């Protein structure tokens, strides 16, 4: 009964594990702790559901998505930096 199907189960375990890691990573980015009731950026009220869903949330949805947009791929600097130092 087990045979070939156990392999699929192992793959599913790996997928579950990486999702778990992603959640942990996302949570560690937020300063865990007390959620703010109002956005520290614009002062808008943060819905209670959001405060509960994201422990330590400090920004409203609008400000958070703006901040996320600015934070994408800062790796370009590193590449350019290491290339420079290699040339010297
Ligand atoms: Zn805001």
Image (tube, rainbow, N blue to C red):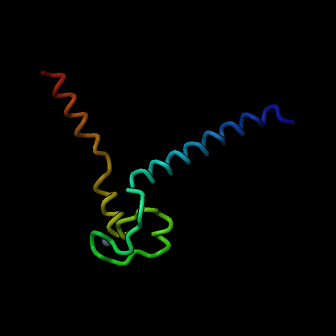
Foreground pick, 60 / 65? 60
Left or right relative to 48: residue 43: left
Residue 31 placement (x, y as % from top left): 38, 56
Foreground pick, 51 / 74? 51
Q: Image quadrant of residue 65?
A: bottom left
Q: Quadrant of the C terminus?
A: top left
Q: Quadrant of the N terminus?
A: top right
Residue 83 placement (x, y as % from top left): 20, 28
Foreground pick, 48 / 76? 48
Q: Residue furthest front?
A: 34
Q: Residue at the location (42% across, 60% down)?
A: 33
Q: Residue furthest right?
A: 1
Q: Residue at the location (61% across, 45% down)?
A: 16
The image quadrant where one finds ligand 1 is bottom left
In the rendered view, would you say 44 is above or below 13? below
Q: Image quadrant of residue 17?
A: top right
Q: Residue at the location (46% across, 63% down)?
A: 54
Residue 61 placement (x, y as % from top left): 38, 69
Q: Residue at the location (71% across, 38% down)?
A: 8
């Amino acid at each position: 009964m087990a045979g070939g199907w156990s392999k699929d189960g192992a793959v599913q375990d790996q997928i579950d594990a990486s999702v778990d890691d992603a959640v942990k990573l996302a949570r560690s980015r937020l300063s865990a702790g007390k959620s703010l009731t109002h956005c520290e950026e614009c002062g808008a009220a943060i819905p209670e559901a959001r405060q509960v869903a994201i422990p330590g949330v400090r920004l409203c949805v609008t400000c958070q998505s703006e901040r996320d947009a600015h934070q994408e791929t800062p790796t370009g600097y590193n590449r350019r930096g290491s290339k420079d130092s290699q040339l010297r």
